[in-house]
């Protein structure tokens, strides 16, 4: 399991759900139904990724959700029904002409998507905790030396921003920030430091 991929799918699901809610409030019911489906689909993909299963198509998401999560008892059968129902309604909303959607029907599907996302979040393992910064001193880490000496050495630091290194940036001669904010973790690549930034 790659935590970054799981989080990315969950974030996409959350954005799709938010879009569905905004579209519903704007009386754009067909589009709200469509976005509700994508919220459910991305949440289902996140749940599958936890088990190292990658679904490459809409049909594969539906099939694998049942075989990987429902049949072994990892999630209740009703959630596979929600996935199927929302997918069928999305196809109808996107491609059928002349079918009018009312506010109540669209709102039920937005609510189903919200409940589905909430249920999938319960299924997922907790986020791993970021490592704590060890106490660093000038003798244990050359980055804590005076600025002139640091510039002479011009170390390369790899700074990871976000959860589990979702964005990497290499900075030459960057000052060490210590302690690190909760959303930042990095590893000092210079020898002999190799400490957590």
Image: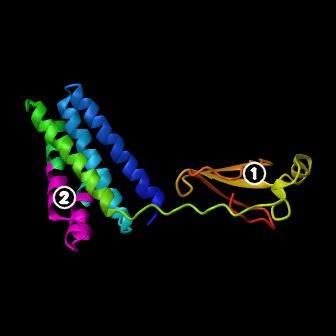
Q: Where is residue 72 shown, x and y percent of the image?
A: 22, 74
Q: Which residue is mark 1?
A: 176
Q: Magenta region's main secondary structure?
A: helix
User: Of residues 170 and 139, which is closer to you in this image?
Assistant: 139
Total marks drawn? 2
Is residue 97 shown above or below 9?
above
Horizontal relation, residue 120 to residue 138: left or right = left
Between label 1 and label 2, give the one nearer the viewer. Answer: 1
Q: Earlier in the sequence, mark 1 or mark 2?
A: 2
**Real-space CA distance between mark 1 and mark 2, rounded to the nearest whole angstrom:** 47 Å
User: Of residues 141 and 81, which is closer to you in this image?
Assistant: 141
The local secondary structure at tag 1 comes to: loop
Residue 139 occupies which quadrant of the picture? Answer: bottom right
User: Where, quadrant-wise, is the N terminus in this rendering?
Assistant: bottom left
Inspect the magenta stretch and tell me whether residue 69 lies in it: yes
User: Where, quadrant-wise, is the C terminus in this rendering?
Assistant: bottom right
Q: Residue at horizontal 24%, vertical 52%?
A: 116
Q: Which residue is mark 2?
A: 79
Q: Where is residue 81 shown, x and y percent of the image?
A: 14, 57
**What's drawn in magenta, residue-wise?**
61-85
Inspect the magenta stretch and tell me whether residue 179 lies in it: no
Q: Where is residue 79 shown, x and y percent of the image?
A: 18, 58
Q: Where is residue 6 shown, x and y percent of the image?
A: 41, 57
Q: Residue at horizontal 81%, vertical 68%?
A: 192
């Amino acid at each position: 399991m790659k935590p970054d991929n799981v989080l990315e799918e969950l974030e996409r699901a959350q954005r799709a759900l938010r879009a569905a809610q905004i579209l519903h409030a704007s009386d754009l019911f067909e589009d709200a139904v469509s976005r509700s489906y994508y919220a459910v689909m991305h949440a289902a993909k996140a749940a599958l990724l936890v088990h190292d299963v990658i679904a490459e198509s809409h049909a594969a998401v539906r099939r694998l959700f049942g075989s990987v999560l429902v049949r072994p008892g990892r999630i209740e059968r009703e959630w596979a029904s929600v996935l199927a129902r929302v997918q069928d309604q999305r196809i109808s909303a996107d491609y059928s002409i002349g079918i009018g959607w009312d506010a109540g029907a669209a709102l039920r599907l937005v609510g189903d998507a919200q409940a589905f996302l909430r249920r999938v979040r319960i299924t997922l393992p907790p986020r791993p905790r970021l490592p704590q910064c060890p106490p660093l001193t000038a003798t244990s880490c050359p980055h804590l030396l005076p600025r002139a000496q640091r510039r002479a050495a011009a170390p390369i630091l790899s700074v990871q921003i976000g959860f589990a290194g979702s964005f990497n940036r290499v900075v030459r001669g960057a000052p060490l920030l210590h302690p690190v904010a909760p959303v930042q973790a990095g590893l000092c690549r210079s020898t002999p430091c190799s400490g957590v930034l």
